[in-house]
Structure formats: structure tokens, C-alpha cells
């Protein structure tokens, strides 16, 4: 009898501790419901429902461990649960809005397997889920190497998705649009333009991943606060419309060195019935730590021009000389034949400074100013740049004086050639050099294969490198704009001097084959979900045969779509990328770029559908002034602009920059019209956009 009772007890115990320990959490508005449970072998799992319907089916949580025998996959029992709620507001240093609400319900699950502790913290907001792993300090789990993170995202139905292939080193891909169930076939198809530099064996995609489920829900999967951990890519299990975490390996194949106490980044699943609310979600920022920089008064949203586009259209070069065979030392430059198209020459840069001063730009980026560009793409590039030695024709002292007298700053460029170790070696000297010459912003770049060898742009060592650079820059009062870095995860909240990143295909690709007209309607739902992009818009001269009759290239947009980008591509750092002579030529359209703000009180997402169109209105920070931007893909469309975001009872003047009637990105891209019209709170306009077109509106009070 006793034995039977004991058996019954054990069965019941096993049942309660392993299979029936489901615990739920609901979002503040009750629409999202998360369920946590342990499966039959004590493996943690979760599922997510939206409005009573399954959105994510049960998916695994946990880890395999590469070092040692500690497995963090199953065998967990007796989970403990703690609930909390948060509802507060905070002010970002800069952003799409002045005040951000942080409102969620939290469930902290404490797990134990063979006295190894792992906690999983779930936060459910009205617009989605965030969860992360926490490894408390403990005797039985001190240092370990992750084999793989097991997190799964198992969609309950198939979905349309906007994806780029998995790659450990670059996110500069065109977006593909397909059903999740078709990703693997598409990835194999030779006709598809996919050339993953570091292809992941199994079909995989990168985040932020944008999805629209067959039930019409918009879902975005990404991560927040990627610190001291590799980036997460996603393996695709196409037939099951499911994804599983695939962390970027380090040089030894490990997927994260963990020393307890530690936390993983947050995994985010943003959910909305309306695509506009994906863009309006602040979950990723809310899950990042507040600013670690106390005095942020020196951090300023910035509009800049640059000695840059001329290199892409073939007029200028980064190199000082073409006369070289081996690596040139500083003293060699006096002996070589200078290249007449070297762009960073003092007199030439002065024209840019004059132009910036005349038109109210804050900064002038100058690329190709420092020695080393002759050799920068070579396997020994770790020795190429020292970041402090100008070419003989770049007079840093004189340019500094000249810019300063005109109230303009030069923007520094540190192309590292991906030799991150070399950059770290020189970084203090480089930043001191910047301070000495009055620079307060740097564009960094990581083109090429990472040094240390075997590391990747998205592996843990590099993730930490970018943060080290941002932190060090803050110590020197320097703002950072990183190119080719791991895609952002909201860390600009914590390090607001890290103004922007590239980390996706930007305008440079208009000169390298062209960006599909839909690209810019996808980016806000993908790359920009993690943070601002240095997209470098403003190419008004969209046809490149102007530079060279053999150049058949063109930006695949109309002229006014380029203006709209200043509103639709959110960033506190905006470049006017075209050449001064083109801005002089299109002076009336250029006025919009001069006027547009880079920091905002409020943002209104008026219309949005990923891959198709976007209309956004924003109010300038601290000013009675609004800007509206609308863009479309390759199809013409009529946007509906509802001006109810304007205060009631007052009239405003709208200056409208729009595609001419016969404009078309392919055949007639630079045809535009500018008109002014009174507008008020009650008005709703129909606004025509050409194929590949856009419009931009500047609204000021009617005085
Ligand atoms: C790629 C960057 O995206 C681009 O802006 C830069 O000019 C080149 N690398 C050279 O650093
Ligand atoms: Ca790039």
C-alpha cells in the first residue's frame, strides 16, 4: 500500500513539476497572453496568444553548453514565479518623440537543474513580448561557453516575410519577400541575388525580421540590448513556419563566453493589427538601459554634407596616389605622383565648408583624408591606418581654422578595414587628435574580414568592440556613426552619443547597381526597428550619366522621394549626400533638406504597409512646425494625408514637394512640383505619388 501511494505521489509530483506547471502572463490590455511551462523532460517552453488565438506555438527555451557538462536544456523542476508591473515615462536624449511610455507586466521564472540556476524574465507590453535569460552568480555555474541558444519562435500560421539571408559579417543585402514556407527554396534558387559572405549551412535569416501572418497580424522579431553576447540570427524551419536562434560563433566556434552573473539580450516579438503600430512600438528602447552618459548636453542631432558621393559617382578618389606597389610609409608620400582626383584636398574641402556654412549644415564629413587608402583592402590591412596622419594635401590645421571661423565642424572618418584590434590600439591617440582639431563626431567603418582573425562582425568580441568604441568616444565627448557594424538593438538609449549606424544597404548602393524602389518601404520595418540608420539620402541628381556618359546608373527613386526620406528614415543624424553643385541646380527642392528637422517632439504614422508604402508626420522638437514624408514602391499611389495631428483652431501653411504628373523613377525621375497651400486640423488630402515616388511637406503656422 505504502509503495502504491509512493508511486502515485511520484507520478503526481512528476506531473505537477514537469507538465502542468504552466504559468501565464497577460499584457496590460489583456490581448497578449504568454504561457510558460516545462515539457515532459523539464525543458522550459513558452507560447504566445493574441486576442485568444495562438500566435506562437510552444517553443523551446534554454541552451546547450559547449564547455563542461552543465546542460541548460532540460531537467529543470519546481520553477518559482514572481510577478511585477511597470508603468512609467522617460525622455530620450533625442528621438522620434519627446516622451516614451514603458508599460508592461512581468513574470520572472526562476529555474534550477542540478543546482544550476537560470532565470527567464518575460515582459509583456500591449504591443509585444520581450524576454531574456539571466544567469545568477552561483558556485556551480561560473564560466561557460554557449553551444547554442535553443530559443524558438514557432508561428502558428504561415506568414509573408521580408528577409535577408543569414550572414555572420554583413547585412548589406536586398530584401526578399516570400512566405516563410518558401524561404528555403528561394534561398537555393540560383536566380535570387543572394551571395552570403558567410553562409550558414541551414537556411537562415537575419533580424529584425518582419512578418505578416496569414491571419493578418504584423509581427517583428528582433533583440534588444545586445551586450557581451553574439548577435542572434534565425534558422528557418520552413515547412513548420518556425525559427530557432542561431548565435554567431566566435573564432573557436563558441557561441558566447558567459561568466555569471550575466544576462542575455532581450528577445523581442512585436505584434500589431496595424502595420503602423510596429513602427510606433518602443519595446526595443524600453528594454535597453537608460543613458550611462550623465551629461548629454554635448550630444546634438546633426545634419551634414560630405566629401563622399563624388567618390561613388567616379569623380573623386579616397587614394592620394595611384603610384604605388607596396605599402607606403608616411615619408613615401612626398615622393609619389599625386592623383588629381584625390577628393580630400584642402582647397576642395573648403568649397564644401563654404557650402555647409551658407546652407546651415552642422558638419562636413571628409573621407580619404588620412594615409593608407592605397592599401586599405589587403590582407595586411591591420597595419594600414593610424587615424592621425593626414595626406600631404589635407591641411588639418588650416581646415580646422577655416571651418571654425564659419561655424562649421569637420566630421572625422575612421575606416578600420575591419582591423578592430588595430583600431583599439590607436583609438586613444585618434580621439585625442580629434579633440585637438575640434572634431566631435566620427564615422567608423568595418569593411572587410575582421581582425582578430576568425571573429565576425556580429560575434561577441565585435559586439563588445563597438560598445567599447561608443563608451570611449563618450569619454572624449565624441558622437559615433558606425558603418558595417552589427545591426543596432536600441543601445543608443544607453549610449546616446552612438547617433546612428549603417548596417544595411543604404544610398551608396544606388551607385552600385541600384536599390529596388521597395527597399526603403521595408527598411523602417526591419533594419530601423533597432535604431537610426545613416541612410545618406538626398540624391537629387538621380541620373548618373551626368557625370560620365558611360555611366548608365541611376537612383531608383524620383527626386521628391529622396526628400521624403528625411522624414520616413528616422535618424538624428542625416546627411545631404548629393554634390553641392546639384543642390545649387535644384535649389528650390534643396530648400526642404535645409529646413527639415532632425529631432522630434511627436511622430504620427499616417499610413504604412511594409514593402508598399509609408506616410509619416513629425513635429519638430520645441517648435510649431511639422514635416510629412510619403513614399511608395515601384507602383504609383494616392496617399491619404489626414492632418488631424495639427492643433485645432489654427491655420498653417504647407509647402508641398511632389512628383510632377508625368514623373516616374525610371523614365522621368527628376520632374517635381512645389506648391504652397493652407491647411488645418480637419483636412484630409489625397496626394499622388509617381511609380518609385514620394512627397514631402513642410508645415509652419500661417502668421
Ligand atoms: C563603406 C561605407 O558604407 C561608405 O560610406 C564608406 O564611404 C566606405 N565604406 C569607405 O569607408
Ligand atoms: Ca556600407
Image (tube, rainbow, N blue to C red):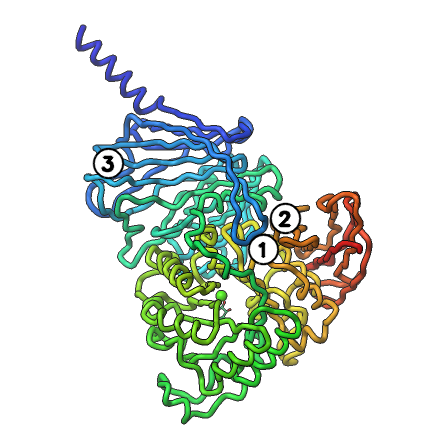
Q: Residue 117 versus residue 596: which sits nearer the camera? A: 596
**x, y percentage for residue 498?**
47, 59
- Please give the name of the residue rendered at 52% of the width and 30% of the height, measured from the top-left corner: 28
Which numbered disc flags the more N-terminal residue, 3 or 2? 3
Disc ID at residue 223: none
Left or right of 422 in this view: 179: right
Quadrant of the frame with the C terminus: bottom right
Q: Residues within 10 Å of mark 1 (few under 14, many from 20)?
A: many
Q: Is the CB of the residue bearing disc 1 within 8 angstroms of ligand 1?
A: no
Do the residues bearing badges 2 and 1 touch, measured as CB atoms within 8 Å? yes
Which numbered disc flags the more N-terminal residue, 2 or 1? 1
* CA separation in Å, label 3 and label 2: 46 Å
Residue 392, above or below 262: below
Left or right of 115 in this view: 368: right
Left or right of 89 in this view: 148: left
Which is closer to the viewer, label 2 or label 1?
2
Q: Residue 22 versus residue 415: which sits nearer the camera? A: 415
Disc ID at residue 116: 3
Q: Under tag 2, what secondary structure?
A: strand
Residue 628 seen anywhere in this rendered image of the structure: no
Q: Is the CB of the residue bearing disc 3 within 8 angstroms of ligand 2?
A: no
Which numbered disc flags the more N-terminal residue, 1 or 3? 3
Disc ID at residue 570: 1
Q: Residues within 10 Å of mark 2 (few under 14, many from 20)?
A: many
* CA separation in Å, label 1 and label 3: 43 Å
Disc ID at residue 603: 2
Quadrant of the frame with the N terminus: top left
**x, y percentage for residue 684?**
78, 46
- Please give the name of the residue rendered at 34% of the width and 28% of the height, measured from the top-left corner: 38
Q: Quadrant of residue 78?
A: top left
**x, y percentage for residue 159?**
54, 41
Which is closer to the viewer, label 1 or label 3?
1
Amino acid at each position: 500500500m505504502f509503495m502504491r501511494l509512493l508511486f502515485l505521489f511520484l507520478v503526481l509530483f512528476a506531473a505537477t513539476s514537469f507538465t502542468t506547471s504552466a504559468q501565464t502572463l497577460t499584457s496590460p490590455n489583456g490581448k497578449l497572453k504568454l504561457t510558460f511551462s516545462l515539457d515532459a523532460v523539464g525543458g522550459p517552453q513558452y507560447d504566445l496568444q493574441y486576442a485568444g488565438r495562438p500566435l506562437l506555438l510552444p517553443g523551446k527555451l534554454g541552451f546547450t553548453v559547449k564547455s563542461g557538462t552543465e546542460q541548460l536544456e532540460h531537467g529543470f523542476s519546481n520553477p518559482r514565479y514572481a510577478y511585477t508591473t511597470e508603468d512609467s515615462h522617460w525622455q530620450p536624449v533625442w528621438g522620434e518623440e519627446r516622451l516614451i511610455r514603458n508599460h508592461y507586466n512581468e513574470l520572472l521564472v526562476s529555474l534550477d537543474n542540478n543546482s544550476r540556476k537560470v532565470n527567464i524574465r518575460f515582459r509583456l507590453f500591449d504591443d509585444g513580448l520581450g524576454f531574456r535569460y539571466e544567469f545568477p552568480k552561483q558556485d556551480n555555474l561560473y564560466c561557460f561557453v554557449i553551444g547554442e541558444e535553443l530559443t524558438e519562435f514557432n508561428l502558428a500560421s504561415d506568414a509573408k516575410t521580408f528577409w535577408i539571408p543569414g550572414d555572420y559579417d554583413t547585412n548589406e543585402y536586398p530584401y526578399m519577400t516570400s512566405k516563410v514556407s518558401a524561404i528555403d527554396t528561394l534561398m537555393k534558387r540560383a536566380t535570387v541575388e543572394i551571395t552570403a559572405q558567410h553562409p550558414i549551412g541551414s537556411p537562415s535569416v537575419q533580424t529584425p525580421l518582419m512578418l505578416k501572418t496569414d491571419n493578418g497580424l504584423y509581427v517583428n522579431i528582433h533583440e534588444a540590448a545586445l551586450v557581451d553576447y553574439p548577435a542572434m540570427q534565425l534558422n528557418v524551419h520552413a515547412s513548420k513556419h518556425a525559427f530557432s536562434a542561431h548565435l554567431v560563433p566566435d573564432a573557436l566556434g563558441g557561441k558566447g563566453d558567459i561568466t555569471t552573473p550575466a544576462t542575455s539580450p532581450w528577445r523581442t516579438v512585436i505584434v500589431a493589427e496595424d502595420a503602423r503600430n510596429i513602427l510606433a512600438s518602443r519595446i526595443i528602447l524600453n528594454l535597453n538601459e537608460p543613458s550611462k552618459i550623465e551629461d548629454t548636453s554635448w550630444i546634438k542631432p546633426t545634419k551634414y554634407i560630405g566629401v563622399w558621393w563624388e567618390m561613388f559617382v567616379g569623380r573623386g578618389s579616397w587614394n592620394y596616389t595611384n603610384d604605388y606597389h607596396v605599402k607606403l610609409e608616411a615619408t613615401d608620400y612626398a615622393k609619389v605622383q599625386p592623383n588629381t582626383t584625390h577628393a580630400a584636398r584642402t582647397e576642395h574641402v573648403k568649397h564644401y565648408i563654404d557650402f555647409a556654412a551658407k546652407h546651415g549644415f552642422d558638419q562636413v564629413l571628409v573621407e580619404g583624408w588620412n594615409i593608407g587608402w592605397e592599401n586599405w583592402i589587403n590582407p595586411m590591412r591591420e597595419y594600414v591606418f593610424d587615424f592621425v596622419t593626414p595626406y600631404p594635401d589635407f591641411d588639418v590645421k588650416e581646415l580646422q581654422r577655416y571651418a571654425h571661423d564659419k561655424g562649421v565642424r569637420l566630421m572625422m572618418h575612421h575606416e578600420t578595414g575591419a582591423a578592430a584590434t588595430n583600431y583599439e590600439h590607436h583609438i586613444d591617440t585618434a580621439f585625442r587628435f580629434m579633440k585637438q582639431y575640434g572634431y566631435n563626431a566620427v564615422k567608423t567603418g568595418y569593411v572587410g574580414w575582421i581582425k582578430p582573425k576568425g571573429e565576425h562582425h556580429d560575434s561577441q568580441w565585435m559586439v563588445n568592440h563597438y560598445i567599447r568604441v561608443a563608451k570611449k568616444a563618450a569619454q572624449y565627448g565624441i558622437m559615433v556613426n558606425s558603418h558595417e557594424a552589427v545591426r543596432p538593438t536600441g543601445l543608443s538609449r544607453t549610449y546616446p552619443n552612438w547617433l546612428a549606424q549603417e548596417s544595411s544597404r543604404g544610398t551608396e548602393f544606388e551607385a552600385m547597381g541600384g536599390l529596388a524602389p521597395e527597399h526603403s518601404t521595408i527598411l523602417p520595418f526591419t533594419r530601423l526597428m533597432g535604431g537610426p540608420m545613416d541612410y545618406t539620402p538626398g540624391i537629387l541628381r538621380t541620373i548618373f550619366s551626368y557625370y560620365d556618359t558611360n555611366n548608365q546608373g541611376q537612383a531608383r527613386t524620383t527626386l521628391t522621394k529622396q526628400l521624403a526620406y528625411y522624414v520616413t528614415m528616422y535618424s538624428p543624424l542625416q546627411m545631404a549626400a548629393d554634390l553641392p553643385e546639384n543642390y545649387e541646380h535644384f535649389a528650390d527642392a534643396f530648400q526642404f533638406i535645409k529646413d527639415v528637422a532632425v529631432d522630434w517632439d511627436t511622430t504620427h504614422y499616417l499610413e504604412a504597409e511594409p514593402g508598399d508604402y509609408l506616410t509619416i508626420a513629425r513635429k519638430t522638437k520645441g517648435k510649431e512646425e511639422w514635416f510629412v514624408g510619403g513614399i511608395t514602391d515601384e507602383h504609383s499611389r494616392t496617399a491619404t494625408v489626414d492632418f488631424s495631428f495639427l492643433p485645432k483652431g489654427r491655420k498653417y501653411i504647407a509647402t508641398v514637394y511632389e512628383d510632377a504628373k508625368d514623373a516616374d523613377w525610371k523614365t522621368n525621375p527628376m520632374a517635381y512640383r512645389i506648391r504652397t497651400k493652407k491647411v488645418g486640423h480637419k483636412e484630409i488630402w489625397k496626394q499622388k505619388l509617381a511609380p518609385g515616388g514620394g512627397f514631402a511637406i513642410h508645415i509652419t503656422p500661417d502668421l
